[in-house]
Amino acid sequence: MATDRDKDVDMTPVSFAPPGPGGAKLDIPRTAQGAPDCALCQKHLHRHGPHPADVAYVSCVLHSFDDGTAVHLCGLDFCAHIGERTVLLGPNGAGKSTLLAHLLGLLKSDEGVVRVFGVDPHKEWRAIRQRVGVVLQNVDVQLIMPTVYDDICFSARQYGWERARIEAAATDIMKRLGISQLAGRTPQSLSGGEKRKVALAGALLTRPELLVLDEAFEGLDPASRAEIVNLLAELSRDEGVSIVLTTHDIDAVAEIADYCYVLRAGGEIVLSGTPAEIFEHADLLEASNIRPPILAELFERLGSKERPLTVADAVEVLAPAGNVVKSEASNNQP
Ligand SMILES: Nc1ncnc2c1ncn2[C@@H]1O[C@H](COP(=O)(O)OP(=O)(O)O)[C@@H](O)[C@H]1O
Ligand SMILES: [Mg+2]
């Protein structure tokens, strides 16, 4: 349904150029700039449409499911910038997967604006699908081929890639994710963590510009989780890939997020900022059932004013005070 908001939005598709290796990040303000124009939530401020640097943009989307359940993704606008890792946080049922489903064109909104690479993904998914890689929360629904290898190659075959190119890319990505030994297995027989890695391999094989991961680390053991965290950092930093993901892994947020959005029950987007910025708002986080990272809690209980979010930061805080001896190993910690 067209709304007054749509009239304000520049519908022209924008061409995107990832910053690439060593490229500078774009410094685009994300704060609300427009006048309140949402009939459902006059209290909120919205920007007038996506900025060209927004790979993905969601503004005041209302979604009503068939059974009448409504999710109102409103409050702050959601903007994912090129080459950044943008993390969605919130309690179960807040609307994180619903937001991602809108980005992937799987759902049609009743109200509001959704843009991915400048187009409405529900209407123009075919135009952008080769630029987007996806791992759904329920990976079972996307692992449909008889073998892991076939599954990983599925999209590339659909896109008409040549066999040799597919083989080289599949070999490379399976090696990178440490799953080469699974190539001949049936996807449905794998563990949850193995399935997630296979789905990620399939999503990455065609080198998407935007990677969307729902519950990115679910089912992964600590070593696998650390590998995927590093891989996502490399993809973003070295290859300019934009990443939008959801997770409940609060202790990982500082390692995996350039920018975060916090949802509360019903879908309202109540908070956004860098990890350090959002963790300053303990009250808003608590209202979204989000506890502080374990390191921040430890330092608070110790009576420290510092709030390190990573082990490396904690060592930096403690070492000058003579409480710990900084070792080489501590520098390698995330
Ligand atoms: N297919 C559906 N039919 C009805 N309600 C749904 C459906 N999918 C999700 N919901 C509801 O929408 C709300 C948001 O769900 P979801 O986006 O999956 O939350 P999250 O990913 O944050 O846990 C929840 O109340 C959920 O029960
Ligand atoms: Mg979900």
Image (tube, rainbow, N blue to C red):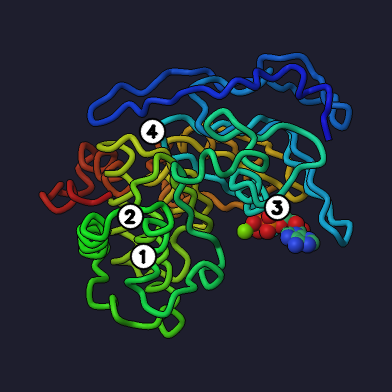
| Mark 4, residue position | 83
**Tag 1 near tag 4, CB within 8 Å:** no
Q: Earlier in the sequence, mark 3 or mark 1?
A: 3
Horizontal arrangement in the rendering, residue 26 relative to residue 44 (left or right): left
Depth check, mark 2 against mark 3: the one in front is 2
Q: Position of residue 268 (x, y in %)?
A: 73, 41
Q: Earlier in the sequence, mark 2 or mark 1?
A: 1
- Relative to 225, say whether 159 is above or below: above
Q: Position of residue 5 (x, y in %)?
A: 78, 23
Three-letter residue code for mark 2: Leu
Q: Earlier in the sequence, mark 2 or mark 4?
A: 4
Three-letter residue code for mark 3: Ala
Q: Nearer the viewer, residue 282 or 106?
A: 106
Q: Mark 2: give few (<14), some (14-19) or many (20+) Cα within 10 Å.
A: many
| Mark 3, residue position | 94
Q: Quadrant of ligand 2?
A: bottom right
Q: Position of residue 317 (x, y in %)?
A: 29, 39
Three-letter residue code for mark 4: Gly
Depth check, mark 1 against mark 4: the one in front is 1
Q: Mark 1: give few (<14), some (14-19) or many (20+) Cα within 10 Å.
A: many
> Is disc 3's CB within 8 Å of ligand 1?
yes
Q: CA distance from mark 2 to mark 1?
A: 7 Å
Residue at position x 63%, y 51% in the image: 101
Q: Position of residue 223 (x, y in %)?
A: 29, 66
Depth check, mark 3 against mark 1: the one in front is 1
| Mark 2, residue position | 205
Three-letter residue code for mark 1: Ile
**Tag 3 near tag 1, CB within 8 Å:** no
**Tag 2 near tag 1, CB within 8 Å:** yes
Secondary structure beneath dot 3 equals loop
